[in-house]
Image (cartoon, rainbow, N blue to C red):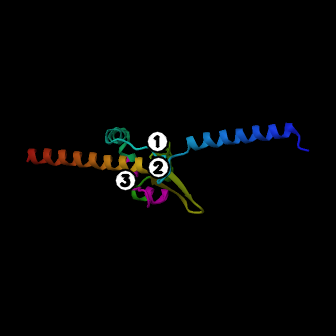
Amino acid sequence: MTNPRSIDSTKKAFSQEIKIKREINERLPYEVNMSRTPTISDEKAADIALSLSPFERDVLNLCSKGKSWRYDGIARKLDTSYADVQEVGHKLQEMRLAHVSVIPYDGSAIFLNARGEAVKSAVNALLRVRLKRLTEKHGASS
């Protein structure tokens, strides 16, 4: 015969396990194709793009949903350290713009989610506006 105490303790343990899994899932970054990925408005994407440093924008521009350079590749392209790229990767992950995938024995890579792609588009729009202003300013001073 089953002990009622053991059933209660099993239920309690199971309940705690579910609670822990929910808490972990809430802290995890949103994956690329998950239905729970919240949408982001163009205005919010622009605000985030403006809040990023030029270096963070450069790193973001080298990443995408499906393809990404590894940290060391991004570091080489931007002439910086692995640790600097890693720091940006963690920041993008905390901002729920990307997730970092560990490649066994080969480092890590940053993959953008839908929010990250929206911010990347805003970053590129910001760069186009700044380039246009520079060319207009340069043309006016000639």
Residue holding disc 2: 98
Circle 1 crowding by C-alpha within 10 Å: few under 14, some 14–19, many from 20: some
Q: Is residue 102 left or right of residue 37?
A: right
33 or 119, nearer to the observer: 33
Residue holding disc 1: 95
Q: Is residue 23 left or right of residue 88?
A: right
Residue at screen point 27% across, 45% down = 126
Count of numbered circles on the image: 3
Mark 1 near mark 2, Cβ–Cβ under 8 Å?
Answer: no
Which quadrant of the figure has residue 8? top right
Estimate the x, y position of residue 100 in percent, counting from the top left.
52, 52
Residue holding disc 3: 61
Of the image marks 3 and 2, the number of the one nearer the N terminus: 3
Q: Amino acid at mark 1?
A: Met
60 or 15, nearer to the observer: 15
**Residue 39 counted in the magenta span:** no
